[in-house]
């Protein structure tokens, strides 16, 4: 039916062309020859009209077939209900089927990192979640003992996100209808396997190979990669070596031609480039159902919190004294009878800060959790503590307020957190304990309830299951990506698009 309709359009246009041609010939006979110039024009004009009409007919046929195919693809994927009823309209994502050297083979090389991170092979098991955790008699009930708790590594997001995307309800095999394109390259794991003891050419080899592979695909040429996104489970600076102070730190994936075009999800944004967006660090809890999330929220809501404040972490002696804040926080915590601390030894093989039950037990017993910057501005501990229902205390705006734009409130930061400027702590102008004790109990309750409300969006659900109504960190991130790509495709104005893409943003490295 659709093909016959298209043929009818073409036949009608051809008839119109013939009619126009015939009319021109009869007028030419009536007038007669009035010179060579007039005769030449009379011969040329009908042909031009025919060519023009045929050109219009060809374009009409092409556009008709093109959009008919797209419409048919969407209709088939939606069982014929049509665009209006398609729940995936505007949310389709096409996932590249990358050669295994870009993901699965990297995971198989996990033992290459044992000299620095120990047994990473254990951490990438179970779809990236790590080894299952079971409740122990001495953990104080810190974890439930039910399914959903794993010894998850803070840099395992590449695998976790990829496995979650395999279950995404709006995946499509037709890239023409996709609103965005996912690139499942394990950039964070690639960083780890070649970071120590290798030259920069080796560190960049997989990234160069990836960009060449992507640029050869028709999906790339549609928008030159600006609708593509990938997940790199480390900080943004780990993939911009040419912009770092240390010329040997990281890969240069995001500084390469092509790499600059893609949107990238990282654990900490550089706050300088508008193509990278921060998403939460993975925690130890990966629910399998809505009921798992709701039960955990009720649990932390009812906890008896015996400590005013708590801190989990190690000193950072390599950070310049002018901005070193953690030493002062540790000193104040040790000097207070209201502060509990889990010190962490920064030595290979130390398990002090890698025992999930110990960490979660402490966070569940504290009202406030201190979150000073360390090597970088953000911390995994922020999300572990918030999942435990502990109110975070920040000392630098780059730790949360300038990060995680999709997962944490853009405004009203003090509804869920406390802010104490790091300069005041370094100059010993403020007592952290005094500030926290001055907050009225009713306000504390409201803040804790806001933290508990945020918990679902900070969790990465088990990739092998599906939450029904609750949106987790992946759901929130995908919505953010779709909105970002839509803004690139349909900017409000050319000027606004240029400004938003190249406007400089504050950098933690610059602040350092």
Image (cartoon, rainbow, N blue to C red):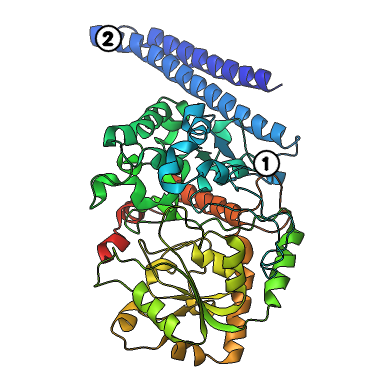
Element type where label 2 sits in the image? loop
Residue 466: horizontal and vertical position, in percent?
A: 71, 49
- Relative to 349, 444 lies left or right: right
- Relative to 77, 44 lies left or right: left
The structure residue drawn at horizontal position 54% and vertical position 19%, both measured from the top left corner, is 13
Characterize the local packing of mark 1: few (<14), some (14-19) or many (20 or more) Cα atoms within 10 angstroms.
some
The structure residue drawn at horizontal position 51% and vertical position 58%, both measured from the top left corner, is 351
| Quadrant hosting residue 432 | bottom left
Characterize the local packing of mark 2: few (<14), some (14-19) or many (20 or more) Cα atoms within 10 angstroms.
few
Element type where label 1 sits in the image? helix
| Quadrant hosting residue 194 | top left
For disc 1, the marked residue is 83
Q: Nearer the viewer, residue 329 or 505?
A: 329
The structure residue drawn at horizontal position 58% and vertical position 73%, both measured from the top left corner, is 362
First reached walking from the N terminus: tag 1 or tag 2: 2
Residue 465: horizontal and vertical position, in percent?
A: 71, 47
Residue 404: horizontal and vertical position, in percent?
A: 47, 61
- Relative to 339, 421 lies left or right: left
| Number of marks present in the image shown | 2
Q: Nearer the viewer, residue 501 or 444?
A: 444
Of the numbered discs in the image, which one, if any, rests on residue 34?
Answer: 2
Residue 388 in view (yes/no)? no
> In the picture, which quadrant includes the C terminus?
bottom left
């Amino acid at each position: 039916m659709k093909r016959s309709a298209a043929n009818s359009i073409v036949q009608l246009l051809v008839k119109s062309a013939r009619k126009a041609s015939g009319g021109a010939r009869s007028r030419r006979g009536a007038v007669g020859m009035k010179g060579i110039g007039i005769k030449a024009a009379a011969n040329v004009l009908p042909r031009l009209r025919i060519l023009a009409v045929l050109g219009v007919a060809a374009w009409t046929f092409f556009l008709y077939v093109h959009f008919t195919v797209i419409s048919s693809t969407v209709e088939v994927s939606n069982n014929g209900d049509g665009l209006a009823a398609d729940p995936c309209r505007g949310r389709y994502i096409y996932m590249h089927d990358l050669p295994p050297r870009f993901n699965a083979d990297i995971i198989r090389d996990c033992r290459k990192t044992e000299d620095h991170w120990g047994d990473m092979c254990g951490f990438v098991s179970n779809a990236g979640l790590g080894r299952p955790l079971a409740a122990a008699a001495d953990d104080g009930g810190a974890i439930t003992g039910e399914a959903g708790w794993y010894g998850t590594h803070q840099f395992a997001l590449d695998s976790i996100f990829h496995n979650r995307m395999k279950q995404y309800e709006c995946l499509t095999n037709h890239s023409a209808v996709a609103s965005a394109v996912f690139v499942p390259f394990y950039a964070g794991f690639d960083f780890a396997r070649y970071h120590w003891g290798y030259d920069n050419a080796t560190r960049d080899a997989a990234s160069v190979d990836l960009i060449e592979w992507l640029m050869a695909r028709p999906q790339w040429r549609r928008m030159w990669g600006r609708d593509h996104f990938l997940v790199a489970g480390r900080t943004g600076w780990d993939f911009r070596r040419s912009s770092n102070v240390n010329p040997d730190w990281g890969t240069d994936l995001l500084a390469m031609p092509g790499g600059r075009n893609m949107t990238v999800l990282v654990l900490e944004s550089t706050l300088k480039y508008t193509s990278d967006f921060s998403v939460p660090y993975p925690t130890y809890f990966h629910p399998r159902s809505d009921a798992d999330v709701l039960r955990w929220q009720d649990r932390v809501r009812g906890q008896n919190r015996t400590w005013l404040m708590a801190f989990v972490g190690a000193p950072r002696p390599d950070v310049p004294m002018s901005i070193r804040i953690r030493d002062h926080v540790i000193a104040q915590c040790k000097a207070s009878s209201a502060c509990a601390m889990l010190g962490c030894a920064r030595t290979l093989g130390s398990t002090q800060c890698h025992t999930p039950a110990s960490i979660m037990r402490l966070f569940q017993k504290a009202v406030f959790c201190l979150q000073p910057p360390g090597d970088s501005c953000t911390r995994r501990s922020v999300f572990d503590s918030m999942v435990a229902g502990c109110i975070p205390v920040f000392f630098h705006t780059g730790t949360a307020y300038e990060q995680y734009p999709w997962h944490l409130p853009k405004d009203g930061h003090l509804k869920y957190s406390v802010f104490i400027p790091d300069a005041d702590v370094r100059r010993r102008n403020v007592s952290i304990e005094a500030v926290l004790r001055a907050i009225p109990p009713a306000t504390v309750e409201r803040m804790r309830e806001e933290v508990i409300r945020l918990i679902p969006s900070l969790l990465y659900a088990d990739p092998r299951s599906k939450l029904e109504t609750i949106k987790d960190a992946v759901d929130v991130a995908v919505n953010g990506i779709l909105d970002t790509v839509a803004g690139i495709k349909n900017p409000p104005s050319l000027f606004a698009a240029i400004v938003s893409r190249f406007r400089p943003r504050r950098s933690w490295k610059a602040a350092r």
